Image: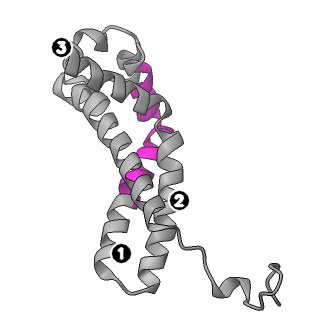
Amino acid sequence: MTSTFPGSTAHPRETPFVPAPALVAVGSVVGLLVVAAYAGGVLLPHVVHDLHHLSHAELTGGAHDPKGLWPADAGLLGALVRLAGVCAAFAGWLLTAPAAVVSAFALRSAAERRAPRRVVLHLVVLALLVSATVVRFTPFGGALVTWSLD
């Protein structure tokens, strides 16, 4: 079977998709920034204020308003961290999911080239991106989004 490109005789499976290094770097950095914003703006305040002991119904009931809790009450920087966390909790998966796909292709490419350091790096990034994407769709993630948007 030949390629669909004119003048090419290469088999399509002989040349797998390898993302450009700039795409991998930008995707990884953007995805990890979303993970950091979610962790700093939603998860950390949730744990710091001992809200992880509450049931999902109590958490989403509105008794614990996140706007009056740290980091939102810590001035401009705290408000920006909270805003970034709320944005990451609500729509961060729209950035982490494509970044995870690019990271998976980069992992495959690094594994084929037998570059162990890059394989470990891409595995760690991929694990963080996939977990940040999946947690949004769990009951706990839904409760955190509801609480953070309260």
As measured in the structure, the alpha-carbon distance from the residue carrying label 2 to the one carrying label 1 is 15 Å
Look at label 2 and name its amino acid.
Val
Q: Label 2 belongs to which residue?
A: 101
Question: Per the image, is 140 magenta?
Answer: yes
Q: Residue at x 40, y 46 (%)?
A: 30
Highlighted magenta segment, given as a residue range = 126-146
Are there few (<14), some (14-19), or many (20+) residues within 10 Å of tag 3?
few
Q: Are marks 2 and 1 in contact (CB under 8 Å)?
A: no
As measured in the structure, the alpha-carbon distance from the residue carrying label 3 to the one carrying label 2 is 37 Å
Question: Per the image, is 39 magenta?
Answer: no
- Measured from the top left, where is residue 24 in percent x and y? 44, 61
Pick the quarter of the image with the N terminus.
Answer: bottom right
Q: Are marks 1 and 3 in contact (CB under 8 Å)?
A: no
- Secondary structure beneath disc 1? helix
In the figure, residue 47 lies in which quadrant?
Answer: top left
Q: State the residue in front, 66 or 78.
A: 78
Q: Earlier in the sequence, mark 3 or mark 2?
A: 3
Look at label 1 and name its amino acid.
Val
Q: Label 3 belongs to which residue?
A: 75
Look at the magenta stretch and give its main secondary structure: helix
Q: Earlier in the sequence, mark 2 or mark 1?
A: 2
Q: Label 1 belongs to which residue?
A: 119
- Secondary structure beneath disc 2? helix
Are there few (<14), some (14-19), or many (20+) residues within 10 Å of tag 1?
some
Mark count: 3
- Secondary structure beneath disc 3? helix
In the figure, residue 12 lies in which quadrant?
Answer: bottom right
Q: Residue at x 21, y 21 (%)?
A: 77
In the figure, residue 123 lies in which quadrant?
Answer: bottom left
Left/right placement of residue 36 relative to residue 109 reads left
Of tags 3 and 2, which is closer to the observer? Answer: 3
Left/right placement of residue 8 relative to residue 135 reads right
